[in-house]
Amino acid sequence: MPKRRKLSRGVAVVGGGLTKLGLFKDRNCKDFFAEAFAEMVGSVDKGFDPKEIDAVYIGNFSNDFFVNQAHWGPIIADLLGVVPKPVTRTEGACASSALAFREGVLAIASGLYDIVLVGGFEQMSKRTTEEVAEGLAMAASPYEVAAGYTFPGVFGAMATAYFAKYGATREDLFNVTIKSHNNAPLNPKAQFPMTIRDFMNARIDRCRKKGEPVPEWKDEKDFLRDPGANPPVAWPMHLFDCCPISDGASCLLLVAEEIARNFTDDPIYVAGLGQGSGYSLHAKKDLTTYEATKYAAKEAYEMSGLTPKDIQFSEVHDCFSIAEIVHMEDLGFFKPGEAYKAVAEGLSRLDGPMPINTSGGLKTKGHPVGATGVAQLYEVWVQLRGKAGRRQVPKPNLRIGAAHNLGGTGGTCTFTILERR
Amino acid sequence: MEERPFNDTSYEQFLKELRIMGSKCKKCGALALPPRPICISCFGGEMEWVEFKGRGRLAAFTSITVAPPYMAKEGFGRNNPYVVGVVELDEGVKTVARIIGVDAKNPSQIKVGTPLEAEFLERGDGPEKKTILAFKP
Ligand SMILES: [Zn+2]
């Protein structure tokens, strides 16, 4: 009989910060983290003294490779002036900072600490696109890489298995891309704050200026079908199925539930969280699900006493368009084989019954690998506090939101449910 | 043969001998490819070698146009994509492998479920020589 996992002490999010995401070659990780930290300090409604931080957990995937520097704990301790407080780095590929968040929650729940800063950062723009691809491939499984797979290739293969099982097609993936890009201009921090229409118009303008023949696309899908506009990367993944290379940092301030109201009258509580692991492609029983996601979700639902129906909106790891669809099913939001139809029907739009990736998702907001997990939770925190501006989920009584983060090709996944009481 | 450890290195050595060798758990009979020292079905640690026939069907695939450096060296890339897949072997386990004899430039015509058989590709010379497991229709 599996025992129900509970936190021994409640944990609340009382502050948060996220940099604008993009490519910033003249700045570095310390600059990014300082920017996110400054926003976080300013966001704590009743103020807060950084001296009170008991410990810091930071997620970073691959600065060892991307900027030739390891051992980031003390660098961040020095930057923030929190020396000699402990700073621990967590690594779970694209889920690195979701692990930092989880470690921070567990540290407070255990009673060891009361105030913990969690966050993450990544700097990918110092390297060429080829080098970044090589760096990211370090997060795939060694068997996949040896066979010649790339990162998008693993997700492409899962897409073909999904198509064969459920009758979906590449056209169904277009709906994910179009939906995410519709949210993007509403997020001032997004790397690509543009709709697909905006991309089409920009391209038409460029052709006009250059005196080249002006392309004519019937609609957004017609644009995405055009290999000139949307070239293949790893069938059926094309450019617009893939998230970009990004720099950025994120952080959240976590405190013990009993002191949360010293920081704000509107704390957002951790209702449940889970983490799972997964096999690589050849050892997966089913190529159309992520066992790591299912396990993480089960843990989080059990801890919170909530069900998928209770989740009012969610950030879902969309490194590639197919990942968003499969995860919507693994998290229980839709039945297996139904998520692609739900996206086509508009159910996951910002104004739909189950908004997915209100931030624009990794596809448009950007994916600074180590910062992403906490960046997703930042979005949920902002939404639950009603401070998401033009992209605010238009539901009365917004109370429960969640974030799902995936590392590598599915080897590490987390699911975290936040709640406004 | 029985003396070799049940690991990735032995798997690769066998490939050089043009054999697809995996492990079978003596306790529960679970198969693994590549071989495993620990059974993931029953956690048993007693294994024996089993040779796979190299026949199966395509369970998933991708045609890669943006190639990593080690594949670009073989001449693959934007104008010369290559296919890798997941093959479900007749014995019931899956393996990831290069798929040859299919039209990588027309991936929409490649069908999941296609019957495949193994072929060994040799690349490089001398100590650098590698044997790669591929499958073709
Ligand atoms: Zn066994």
Image (cartoon, grey):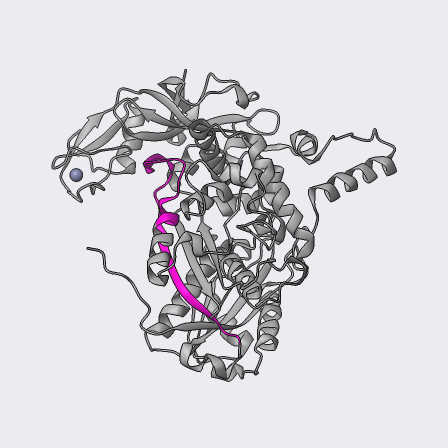
Q: In the image, is A255 to the left or to the right of B64? A: left
Corner quadrant of residue A40:
bottom right
Residue A86 part of the magenta segment: no
Residue A1 spot, x, y in % from top left: 19, 55
Q: Nearer the viewer, residue A394 or B80?
A: A394
Corner quadrant of residue A158:
top left
At 43% from the left and 52% from the top, the residue drawn is A309
Residue A355 spot, x, y in % from top left: 55, 51
At 78% from the left and 29% from the top, the residue drawn is A216
Residue A121 spot, x, y in % from top left: 54, 61
Q: In the image, is A404 to the left or to the right of B106? A: left
> Is residue A315 shown above or below A166?
below
Q: Residue reaching furthest left?
A: B27
Residue A293 part of the magenta segment: yes
Total numbered labels placed on residues in the image: 0
Residue A54 in sight in this render: yes
At 31% from the left and 72% from the top, the residue drawn is A8
At 53% from the left and 59% from the top, the residue drawn is A371
Residue A71 in sight in this render: no
Q: Nearer the viewer, residue B71 or A206?
A: A206
Q: Quadrant of ligand 1?
A: top left
Residue A265 spot, x, y in % from top left: 53, 79
Q: In the image, is A302 to the left or to the right of B49? A: right
> Is residue A146 shown above or below A373?
above
Corner quadrant of residue B54:
top left
- Give the magenta-colored segment's residue range: A266-294
